[in-house]
Image (cartoon, grey):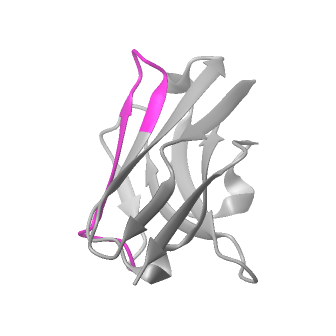
Amino acid sequence: QVQLVESGGGLVQAGGSLRLSCAASGRTTSSYAMGWFRQAPGKEREFVAAISRSGGSTSYSNSVKGRFTISRDNAKNTLYLQMYNLKPEDTGVYYCAADASILITTKAFGYDYWGQGTQVTVSS
């Protein structure tokens, strides 16, 4: 089992940057593929990015590709999401998640553990 705690959210102007972190405790994160999802008010939770256990494979949603970078430091049990050129439509609660399966997935139901989320607000 693993516990996940996100941090780094906040209010930023359009075009700005933020770096989210997700600290894991319990079982080491190298045992899990990891992902970031977000949820805007009134909308379903959507996939943002995912990374394999080793960090050697990544996947991004089309809406963030080229602007966001997912990475991990297994020695620190920490997952990151570097976000550049933020847009108002990036606003939402960002969640990190851990998936015990070998392959990364873009589907929320494929993840076993979730953090509590961190709010990102992008003003125009």
Look at the picture and state if 31 lies above or below 101.
above
| Residue 15 screen position, x and y as percent | 26, 73
Q: Is residue 88 magenta?
A: no
Residue 14 placement, left or right of 105: left
Quarter in which the N terminus is drawn? top right
Residue 60, by quadrant, is bottom left
Quarter in which the C terminus is drawn? bottom left
| Residue 122 screen position, x and y as percent | 45, 72
Q: Can residue 3 be seen in this view?
A: yes
For the point 48% across and 44% down, the residue is: 8
Q: Does the magenta stretch include residue 64?
A: yes
Q: As rendered, which of 86 and 81 lies closer to the eye? A: 86
The magenta-colored residue range is 63-79
Residue 78 placement, left or right of 15: right
For the point 46% across and 28% down, the residue is: 78
Residue 67, by quadrant, is bottom left
| Residue 82 screen position, x and y as percent | 33, 51
For the point 53% across and 43% down, the residue is: 34
Look at the picture and state if 100 lies above or below 122.
above
For the point 34% across and 37% down, the residue is: 55
Residue 44, by quadrant, is bottom right
